[in-house]
Amino acid sequence: MPTLKEQFWDPVAGFGVTFRTMFRKVVTEQYPFEKKPTAPRFHGRHQLNRWPDGLEKCIGCELCAWACPADAIYVEGASNVDGERYSPGERYGRVYQINYLRCILCGLCIEACPTRALTMTNEYELADNNRADLIYEKSDLLAPLLPGMEQPPHEMLIGADESDYYRGTFTTRDRSGAAGPEKEV
C-alpha cells in the first residue's frame, strides 16, 4: 500500500512535466503554407527512368512486384517487336501500376530492380480525394523527356545492342545508322 507521501508526490511529479513544457516555444509547422525541403535520401513517389535516347529502362522482369511486401505493384511485360521498341532489351513493361493506397514506401522494389529503372523521388504529397487517382499508371510514373530524348517507340539510338546500354558504353548514332564517337554516360 502506497504511503501518504507517495500518494501526494506522484501527481505533483506528473504536473511538473506539464509545467516544464508549457512555456517552451511552439514547434508547429505550417505545412500547407510553408513547405520544408525533404532530406536528400527521402523515399517519396516512384519514378520510371529512361535511357539518354528516351527508351525506357524497365525490362518488364516483374522483380519489383515480387519484392513488394504490400503487393502494391503490378507489372505486365511484353516483347519488343521490330519497329516498336520501348526498351533496349527484348522485353519492356507494357503495363506498370503502383497502388499508393497499399504502398508503404519501403524501397524494396528499388533494390530489386536490375536496371535501375525504378527510383524514388522526393515528392511526398500523395493524398487525393479519390481512391482511383492513387493508382499510378505507367504514364504517371515515367520520367519526363529531356532535351535530346525521343518519345518511344523507336530503334536504339545510342548503342549497337542492349549490352551497350547496360554497360554504359554508348556509341551515338544518327537516324541513318552511322556511328559516332563512343562515350560514357
Image: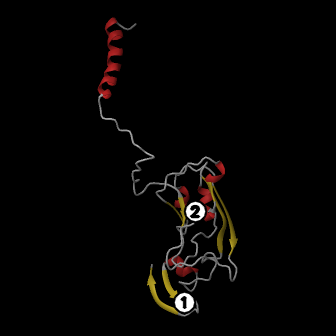
Residue in the foreground of this view, choosing between 13 and 139: 139
Q: For the residue marked with disc 2, what is the amino acid?
A: Leu
Reading the image, the residue beneath label 2 is 141
Q: Residue at x 54, y 62 (%)?
A: 47
Q: Quadrant of residue 2?
A: top left
Question: Residue reaching furthest front?
Answer: 33
Where is residue 49? Give x, y as percent.
Answer: 53, 68
Reading the image, the residue beneath label 1 is 174
**Label 2 SS:** helix
Q: CA distance from mark 1 to mark 2?
A: 28 Å
Where is residue 80? Give x, y as percent.
Answer: 68, 77
Where is residue 170? Give x, y as percent.
Answer: 49, 83
Q: Residue at x 63, y 75 (%)?
A: 86
Q: Residue at x 58, y 76 (%)?
A: 55
What's the mark number on residue 137? none
Residue in the foreground of this view, choosing between 166 and 27: 27
Q: Is residue 11 above or below residue 121?
A: above
